[in-house]
């Protein structure tokens, strides 16, 4: 079964949804940027967890995935952003080692690792302390980028209204601007959620 | 997961991982060992365990020692340095226990 969904920066919503699907007897088989493909399985046979891996370099991710698969888990990669360009290069100053250069195809659209394991009644998370700060930093950048695009396009839209008679250009720029503003709001909400989580993790550490 | 080793203390996770490797063991084996020894009180997440293993390998306290025949799972074992660290940690804990016992059990007198 194929389902089209996009969760963007809402990592927990995605995790919850995958777990709900697993409860109903659907096991993840494949992911693409907007689509999840499921196989049938026994209800509640598996459970899912999502981990943010964009700050890790490829050899770490490879090694980590093979470690998890040795433990009997299955892993999938997933994107946070929606980007369909090929040959993209992006600098990630906050990442470590060669992970600082993200490419598409490559690590640019593989920010998340979905980990599947058999539900054994024991509720253990992958990490005792999640990397909440890296997630928040990443989503903040996405929000800013989308907001800036929206702003520039909105200005372009205004300019074309006053400077030229072409309505088509104004409508196109306006529509694009709204599109980016909506994405910016989407990421802003995700950021607020991530920041709350970060604060909670910090409070736990201080106890 | 930080070990304040100048003060001598290891985290519980670190110490348990080292104890689990007095005989060669793989990731899953370490996890089971800790779970069994603590009767399920301490269950490590796979990601946490992965971090702990890598951290200890880079410190030179444990080392990879080939693969388990048949399953190709990576095996690890404790090194000589690691044993010394573990022995020192045991001494430190015994000392701590003695002091705690003296104060807590002696406080009634």
Image (cartoon, coloured by chain):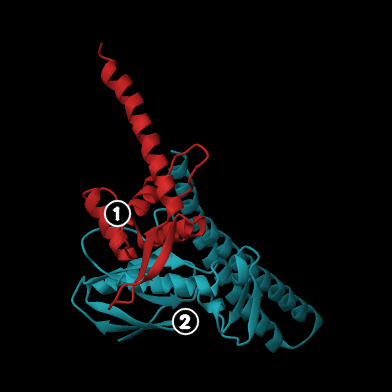
- Is residue B43 toward the left or the right of residue B49 in the image? left
Chain drawn in cyan: A
Q: Residue at x 56, y 77 (%)?
A: A108
Q: Quadrant of residue A147?
A: bottom right
Which residue is more in the foreground, A197 or A113?
Answer: A113
Which residue is more in the foreground, B82 or A53?
Answer: B82
Which residue is more in the foreground, B53 or A33?
Answer: B53
Q: Is residue B26 above or below residue A160?
A: above
Crowding around mark 1 (Cα neighbors within 10 Å: few <14, some 14 to 19, many 20+) is many
Residue A50: % across, % down: 40, 67
Crowding around mark 2 (Cα neighbors within 10 Å: few <14, some 14 to 19, many 20+) is some
Which residue is more in the foreground, B59 or B12?
Answer: B59
Q: Residue furthest right?
A: A163
Q: Residue at x 21, y 64 (%)?
A: A120
Q: Quadrant of residue A2?
A: bottom left
Chain drawn in red: B
- Is residue A179 toward the left or the right of residue A201 in the image? right
Q: Residue furthest left?
A: A42
Q: Residue at x 59, y 71 (%)?
A: A99
Label 1: state its secondary structure: loop
Q: Which residue is mark 2?
A: A33
Find out whether the residues at labels 1 and 2 contact each other: C-beta distance under 8 Å.
Answer: no
Q: Is residue A135 above or below residue A173?
A: above
Q: Which residue is mark 1?
A: B43
Q: Is residue A64 above or below residue B6?
A: below
Label 2: state its secondary structure: loop
State which chain disc 1 sits on.
B
Residue B11 visible in rendering: no
Q: Quadrant of residue A176?
A: bottom right
């Amino acid at each position: 079964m194929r389902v089209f969904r996009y969760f963007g920066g809402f990592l927990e919503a995605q995790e919850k949804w995958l777990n709900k699907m697993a409860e109903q007897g659907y096991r993840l088989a494949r992911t693409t940027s907007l689509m999840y493909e499921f196989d049938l399985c026994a209800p509640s046979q598996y459970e899912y967890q999502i981990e943010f891996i964009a700050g890790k370099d490829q050899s770490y991710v490879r090694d980590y995935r093979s470690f998890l698969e040795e433990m009997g888990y299955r892993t999938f990669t997933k994107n946070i952003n929606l980007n369909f360009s090929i040959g993209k290069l992006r600098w990630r100053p906050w990442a470590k080692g060669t992970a600082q250069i993200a490419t598409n195809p490559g690590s640019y659209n593989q920010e998340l690792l979905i980990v599947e394991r058999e539900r054994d009644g024991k509720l253990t998370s992958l990490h005792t302390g999640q990397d909440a700060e890296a997630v928040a930093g990443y989503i903040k950048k996405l929000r800013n980028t989308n907001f800036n695009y929206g702003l520039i396009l909105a200005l372009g839209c205004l300019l074309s209204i006053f400077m030229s008679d072409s309505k088509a250009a104004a409508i196109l720029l306006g529509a694009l601007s709204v599109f980016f503003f909506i994405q910016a709001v989407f990421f802003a909400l995700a950021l607020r959620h991530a920041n709350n989580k970060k604060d909670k993790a910090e409070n736990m550490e201080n106890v | 997961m930080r070990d304040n080793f100048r003060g001598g203390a290891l985290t519980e996770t670190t110490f348990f991982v080292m104890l689990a490797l007095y005989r060669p063991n793989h990731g899953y084996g370490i996890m089971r060992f800790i779970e069994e020894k603590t009767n399920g009180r301490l269950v490590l997440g796979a990601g946490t365990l992965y971090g702990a293993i890598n951290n200890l390998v880079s410190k030179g306290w444990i080392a990879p020692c080939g693969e388990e025949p048949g399953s190709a799972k990576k095996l690890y074992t404790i090194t000589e340095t690691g044993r010394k660290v573990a022995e020192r940690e045991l001494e430190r804990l015994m000392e701590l226990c003695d002091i705690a016992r003296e104060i807590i059990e002696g406080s009634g007198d």
